[in-house]
Amino acid sequence: MNERNIKELGLQKRIDIESKFRPEIEGLRVVAALLVAIYHIWFNRVSGGVDVFFVISGFLITTSIISTINRTGEFKFLPYVTKLLKRLLPSVLFILAVVLILSTFLLPESILGKTIREVVASMFFYQNWQLAISSTDYLDATQMKSPVEHFWALSIQGQFYLIWFVLFSFILWMMNKYQIKSIKTVINMILGVLFVTSLSYSIYLTEVNQPWAYFITMTRVWEFALGSLLCINLSAIRVPKWIAVIIGWLGLVGLIATGILFNVSQMFPGYIALWPMTCALFIVLSGTQDTRFGLKRFLGSKPMVKLGGIAFGIYLWHWVLLEFYRYNVQQTPGLLMGSLIIVSSIALSYLMTEWIEKPIRTATVNQIAFKKLEAMMGVNILLIGSLLGMSYMQEQELKKQVSSDRYPGAMAIKNALNVSEENPFPSYANVFNDLPLVHTDGSNQGLKDSDVKVGQYGKKKDYKATIALVGSSHSEQWFGALHEAVKGTDIRLINLTRSGTRFSTGYEPDSLKGTWNQNVLDYLKDADVDLIISHVTAADASKDRIHQQMIDQMQFVKDEYGIDGLALRDNPRYDFNVLEALETSSIEDTTKKMNAQDNQTDEAFWKNFEKTNKSLYKMDLTRYFHVKGEYRPVIGNVVIYRDNSHMTNTYAKSFGPLFKEKITEVLSEKLGSK
């Protein structure tokens, strides 16, 4: 694509511009793509290259829009969108089809559902919002990455193109209606306001909710606006040749070092993102001068320009190849394999561009081009339906085999059953989504507010006793067991849980977590509750203070409100995803990995707590997580973990008889007297 600089903006519909090819921008595109690939492959880090893509996209699309206005005197939606779809969809649909086919044979079953959701999101350019929601879901944040996760950047780009259509349509309308004399000033003002507003919001949101800020569109608009501002004003900027040489190479070195200097995935897109933006700005400004030793000679060379033309495909292919390699060979490729992934990405991108993208993009008859796109879309939909259908049938077939004797779960330990671990349940494809009812029916409190949600279960009328499950996801995971325990009884069960928030005295009073804790206390003060149940240790916490603060909160409820407390010891936790290990290795190898680390640092504290605290009831179920002292990922033919620390709902439900026995013991007098 030829790049043009705007030389002058006039009053008329026609805007006089000077056309000029910018080869260094093509070279910058491939630098950004290769940086993303290199950091992903060998350093498992984010490079900041995507942010540079956004700046370049802002520059190029603004040039294209103004060229259209200059040529036709108008800016229509259908030609604009048609051109974009012919440019973007061929590569997107083709790669997604390849991913769906390979997923059948090479992808772990546990992320098949996640991958399909993200494929659909990528097809319709809302993948960034899909990931934003996932990354702020406490129980979803640790799930394995899909082969199409990187499509979030392309989704933002597609949304940005629509925003820019609205923006420049408004500007053109103002030009025609009000006969503005200095339209360049107006464009700069509008883009400047967008830049400042979006950057300010990005800085704020990155501080308060970085996972959400990283993916949403509004926090990235300023990066596109910067590229547009650069496009509008570049012809008016004069950079001395010696300065152009210096800032060009400084920009390149600074850009390469971004991923080393900053933890991009946790610090962007706040003010730190100004670093790669400034580097990109330096590189583009340096390209305004032709110098012997300038960066432009390198970035604008024929090989770099040629690679820049397929940089889009390099970015899309590298992650797909990398993830399939990780799931089937090893997590971090060596130098040879990593280099092969990059070379393969370049080759595939070139072939895709020549044989898939160009024939559609350059088709003079739009009807023919869109018939091809419709066929590609149809193939993808058919593949998605086939994968979902196969997964559903496999799960139904497995469910037919499920029985209490073949799949006893924790009861295999209690009753000393020797159960063959064949076809464990849930199937790996469904383990991750095997969640307690309260997490799927909306009763669980999310991370964004501090109000108390009260979910009621069991016997809701004429009940004789009420138990309340309180605390974080490590309390919530026991809901299945409690729900089983109260079946057929006169007990009401209520849920008072909030993801990522312990029932503890350890939070600042004015924080969201501290406020939620106080709101729970206020509710319990006047509630008809006989027993609260919560975990009082965190198996991965080495500080006794953390455990004690949870005990103190339960003790407060007991002393001040007269409500009994059942304190649960936390289940073992691991520093790796157990489900991922199961799928990528074996039950035996995962067992070895589980037993190679200290998975319960709360051991000494719990023993002391059992001896010294006489007013709270206690329940230690950790013995149901190992067989003869060996911690295992599957017990009683049931998969225990859905990630690194949370139980599957199926395994939790198998504890139902144990909780029923304990609750009956604790509430025996109240059940008999009420």
Image (cartoon, rainbow, N blue to C red):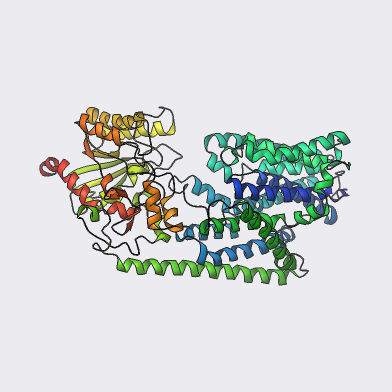
Where residue 391 sits: x, y (%)?
44, 66
Where residue 262 sits: x, y (%)?
61, 36
Q: Is residue 509 left or right of residue 615?
A: right
**Quarter of the view holding residue 77:** bottom right
**Quarter of the view holding residue 347:** bottom right
> Which residue: 67% across, 45% down?
49
Where residue 193 sits: x, y (%)?
70, 37
Where residue 57 sits: x, y (%)?
72, 49
Who is closer to the viewer here, 401 or 412? 412
**Quarter of the view holding residue 47:** top right
Q: Is residue 66 left or right of residue 261?
A: right
Of the 4 image quadrants, the one containing the N terminus is: bottom right
Who is closer to the viewer here, 580 or 488? 580
Image position of 233 with respect to 382: above or below = above
Total count of labels: 0
Image position of 528 with respect to 341: above or below = above
Image position of 483 with respect to 615: above or below = below
> Which residue: 84% across, 34% down?
243
Image position of 158 with respect to 183: above or below = below
Q: Is residue 510 visible?
A: yes
Who is closer to the viewer here, 533 or 672? 533
Who is closer to the viewer here, 259 or 53? 259
Q: Is residue 196 left or right of residue 141?
A: right
Of the 4 image quadrants, the one containing the C terminus is: top left
Q: Is residue 169 visible?
A: no
> Which residue: 51% across, 66% down?
105
